[in-house]
Image (cartoon, grey):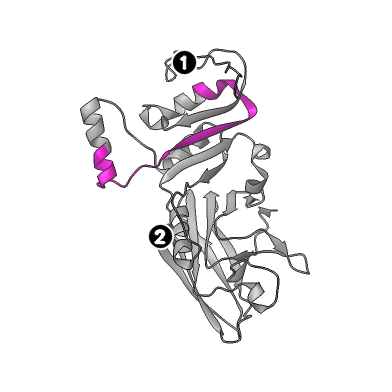
Amino acid sequence: YVDKPFETEFIELDIEAEPIPDGEMFDCVLFLSSLHHFYNPIQVIRHTVSRLKPDGCLAIMEAAAPEPGTVYDDKNRELMEKFKTLERPLSRRNLVAVLDACGFVHRNFYQPVNGLFLPNQESLEKVRSEVCKQNWNCVLAYRSSEALPEDVKKNRISHKDGLIEFQAGFYDSENEEDGSAYRWAAPEACLEVFGDIESVDVELECIFMDPDKDRIKVFVSRDDLVIHHKIITKKEPSVKLTLETSSQINRFVFMSDYVFQPDWFGIPDKRALSYKLRLIGDDNVEG
């Protein structure tokens, strides 16, 4: 942008009281570490996106609410008392409710990962830990599913009662010879269920390429509470289980004690794999 002056318009406005005046439509609305300062974030978003294009993007970047009684929670209270301001970051669950109320039901959350990570297993575990923390509310949200980035859409499956999303640890969908779909999972993988879906039935299948391995353990947790412990063996290489939901958002984390790379056995594939996962027995799933 050297030698190209910015064409910038500044508007002084009480955005909680009234919308932005009519004018040119926006491609994007960005709240950068600001949403937590408003008393009524729903009204603020509604008033701001009044000039957002139908396929425009609502972007929010700020930290998620800390747990009550923690150092960060105490610090927010100190700042409010000292400066007479509002320091009220939203939890992930509350932000989702705000986005729903504003009509931005199609979205994707991102978790920033910062630091120097060496190419070894210990660093990999640190990266996974950072990705799964959910201590940030960085989100791109849209009114229409068609506006979602392609890499997000391919990892989402529509359900008549909500949405199923394959997140970190699951690879792209593949098809068996009979046309049935499955996804390879890494030793740690996350599946998230949104909406009013009461349960999701899945099948886990392990392919034992290592001759010295004849069984694996898989633990499944929901919102940090272990709900399944399964053992898969060469004799019984697949198991079925039901993921029962408990609220509007359910995060299921799969942990396995088995990992292999196909290229260890002469197959040109360097992915870290553990087992296959299939969605089964649900006619309400689309895609």
Of the pair 50 and 126, the residue shown nearer to us: 126
Q: Which residues are magenta?
A: 47-75
Which residue is labeled 2 in the image? Answer: 224
Q: Residue at x 68, y 58 (%)?
A: 283
The kind of residue tagged 1 is: Glu
Q: Is residue 128 left or right of residue 204?
A: left
Is 245 located above or below residue 45 in the figure?
Answer: below
Answer whether residue 57 is magenta in the image.
yes
Q: Earlier in the sequence, mark 2 or mark 1?
A: 1
Question: Residue 124: x, y in percent?
Answer: 48, 62
Question: Residue 139: x, y in percent?
Answer: 51, 40
- Mark drawn on residue 192: none
Report helix, strand or loop for mark 2. Answer: loop
Give me the C-alpha separation between circle 2 and circle 1.
41 Å
Which quadrant would the N terminus be assigned to in this image?
top right
Q: Is residue 59 left or right of residue 235?
A: left
Which residue is labeled 1 in the image? Answer: 18
Question: Residue 107: x, y in percent?
Answer: 57, 41
Of the pair 264 and 220, the residue shown nearer to us: 264
Q: Is residue 173 left or right of residue 179?
A: left
Residue 4: name its quadrant: top right
Is 251 located above or below residue 185 in the figure?
Answer: above
Q: Residue at x 40, y 62 (%)?
A: 225
Is 67 located above or below residue 62 in the figure?
Answer: below
Q: Residue at x 42, y 66 (%)?
A: 226
Answer whether residue 257 is magenta in the image.
no
Residue 172: name its quadrant: bottom right
